Image: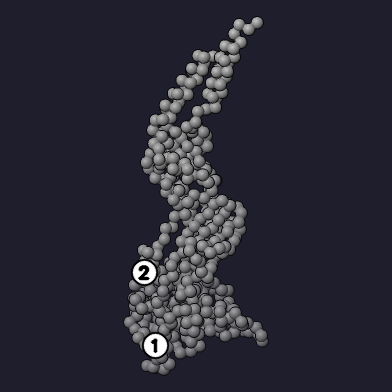
């Protein structure tokens, strides 16, 4: 028994000496208790491997810490059922600059959307979902069970003026009114007679330092068509509608041409008009790079394309002012929002200053883990490679049995 005790103690001593060598110890930790393991792995050279069971979200600091340990030579591995989820936050290119939050997830359950103030909305987990909010404070996050994705919210960017080119009539008047109500700084040039125009002061020169978008409503924009084409090539936006689609240089940048005019629906007494009821000039002969955005029974009515560094939209709706005037209680707001969104669609996208660009780490937790630590470890490989700084319990049991057996044999030696 004494010999067995000595052998067990020798084994324990040998294991302790091996564990004292650099890189001889492997640690296991959960996401909820990762802080202590990170401290130990950093403060002692005995830790050679660290395995993390990702049972909850890791903070960007913890993920960066694990990546730093891996670069320092510690074998860092992880495993866990981390959902493939992501969150993206953008602002519309409008003066109001509503926040557009897009989420994706491959898991099941409820997605809860929050900002720094509180809950914004919740949706059933699906392949994709989108939520629009009037404003978002601080950072936005989407949570699913114990995991979450976070994203910064881009800062608002001041928009430049919009120039409206069209005849002095209902359409020009109400397009200018809609843009002004939506917060755009709208300027106009409205011919009222040959050689006579109602013009805002200092309309020209037409360049991207002064304007975001030019809206050509009819063929009266033909004399400025070369300037508009140059403006778009330099990064500006343009909306071309009606007969302006066939005006000189505008035809060269437009996504499509305008077809024959189709009358709108005849309204009955007390009836209201929607966008689908407007007179239209369906877009024909679209370019190969044109992207269709809206269709009506009469055909394609809105398309957009890139031209140079800018964007151009072709609009086939005719007399959109009828929508505002005959659209009932919601007509005015619907007309205003549609024209504001169309203008924002082609407005240039400006990158905020470096001070406004926040760290986007954490917007896709599984992708961030894969980028920092690689693929998750196989569970069988974890069991084979794992070791512990503690002596196995069996050695303690053997030592106690040997000690007790030796003591008992000495006490009862010679007893009859």
- 356 left or right, relative to 98: left
| Total residue callouts | 2
Q: Which residue lies at the image location 50% right of the left edge and 28% below the top edge?
A: 391
Q: Which residue lies at the image location 39% right of the left edge and 36% below the top edge?
A: 45
Above-or-below relation of 339 to 46: below
Instruction: From the top left corner, tell me how far across and down residue 307 is, in percent.
Output: 38, 70
Q: Earlier in the sequence, mark 1 or mark 2?
A: 1
Q: Which residue lies at the image location 41% right of the left edge and 84% below the top edge?
A: 187
Q: Which residue lies at the image location 36% right of the left edge and 69% below the top edge?
A: 309
Instruction: From the top left corner, tell me how far across and down residue 191 is, in percent.
Output: 41, 90
Residue 200, which numbered label?
A: 1
Which is nearer the eye, 162 or 395? 395
Instruction: From the top left corner, tell me how far across and down residue 52 is, in percent.
Output: 49, 42
- 331 left or right, relative to 227: right
Q: Quadrant of the N terminus?
A: top right
Q: Quadrant of the C terminus?
A: top right
- Label 1 Cα crowd, 10 Å radius (few <14 / some 14-19 / many 20+): few
Residue 309, which numbered label?
A: 2
Q: Kindly report which numbered mark, 1 or 2, lies closer to the viewer in this rendering.
A: 1
The answer to which image quadrant residue 412 occupies is top right
Above-or-below relation of 301 to 125: below
The answer to which image quadrant residue 112 occupies is bottom right
- 378 left or right, relative to 306: right
Residue 410, which numbered label?
A: none
What is the secondary structure assignment of the residue under circle 1? loop
Please name the colour scheme applied to the rendered image. one colour
What is the secondary structure assignment of the residue under circle 2? loop
Above-or-below relation of 14 to 320: above
């Amino acid at each position: 028994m004494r010999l067995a005790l000595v052998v067990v103690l020798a084994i324990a001593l040998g294991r302790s000496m091996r564990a004292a060598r650099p890189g001889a110890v492997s640690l296991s930790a959960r996401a909820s208790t990762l802080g202590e393991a990170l401290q130990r792995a950093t403060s002692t050279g005995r830790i050679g491997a660290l395995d993390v069971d990702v049972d909850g979200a890791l903070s960007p600091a913890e993920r960066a810490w694990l990546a730093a340990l891996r670069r320092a030579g510690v074998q860092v591995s992880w495993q866990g059922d981390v959902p493939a989820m992501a969150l993206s936050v953008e602002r519309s290119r409008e003066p109001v600059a509503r926040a557009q939050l897009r989420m994706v997830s491959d898991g099941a359950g409820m997605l809860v959307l929050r900002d720094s103030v509180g809950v914004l909305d919740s949706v059933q987990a699906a392949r994709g979902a989108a939520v629009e909010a009037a404003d978002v404070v601080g950072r936005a996050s989407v949570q699913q069970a114990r995991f979450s994705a976070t994203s910064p919210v881009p800062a608002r960017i001041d928009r430049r003026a919009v120039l409206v080119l069209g005849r002095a009539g209902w359409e020009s008047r109400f397009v200018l009114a809609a843009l002004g109500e939506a917060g755009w700084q709208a300027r106009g040039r409205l011919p009222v007679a040959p050689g006579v125009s109602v013009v805002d002061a200092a309309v020209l020169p037409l360049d991207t330092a002064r304007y975001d978008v030019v809206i050509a409503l009819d063929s009266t924009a033909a004399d400025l068509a070369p300037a508009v084409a140059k403006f778009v090539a330099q990064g500006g936006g343009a909306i071309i509608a009606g007969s302006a689609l066939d005006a000189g240089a505008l035809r060269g940048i437009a996504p499509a041409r305008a077809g024959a005019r189709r009358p709108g629906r005849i309204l009955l007494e007390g009836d209201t008009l929607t966008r689908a009821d407007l007179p239209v000039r369906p877009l024909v002969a679209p370019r190969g790079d044109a992207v269709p955005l809206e269709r009506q029974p009469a055909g394609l009515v809105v398309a957009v394309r890139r031209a140079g560094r800018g964007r151009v939209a072709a609009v086939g709706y005719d007399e959109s002012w009828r929508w505002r005037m005959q659209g009932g209680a919601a007509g005015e707001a619907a007309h205003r929002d549609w024209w504001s969104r169309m203008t924002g669609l082609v407005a240039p996208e400006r990158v905020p200053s470096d001070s406004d660009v926040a760290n986007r780490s954490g917007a896709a937790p599984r992708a961030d883990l894969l980028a920092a630590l690689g693929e998750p470890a196989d569970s069988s490989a974890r069991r084979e490679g794992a070791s512990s700084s503690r002596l196995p319990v069996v050695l303690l049991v053997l030592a106690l049995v040997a000690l007790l057996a030796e003591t008992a044999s000495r006490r009862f030696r010679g007893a009859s």
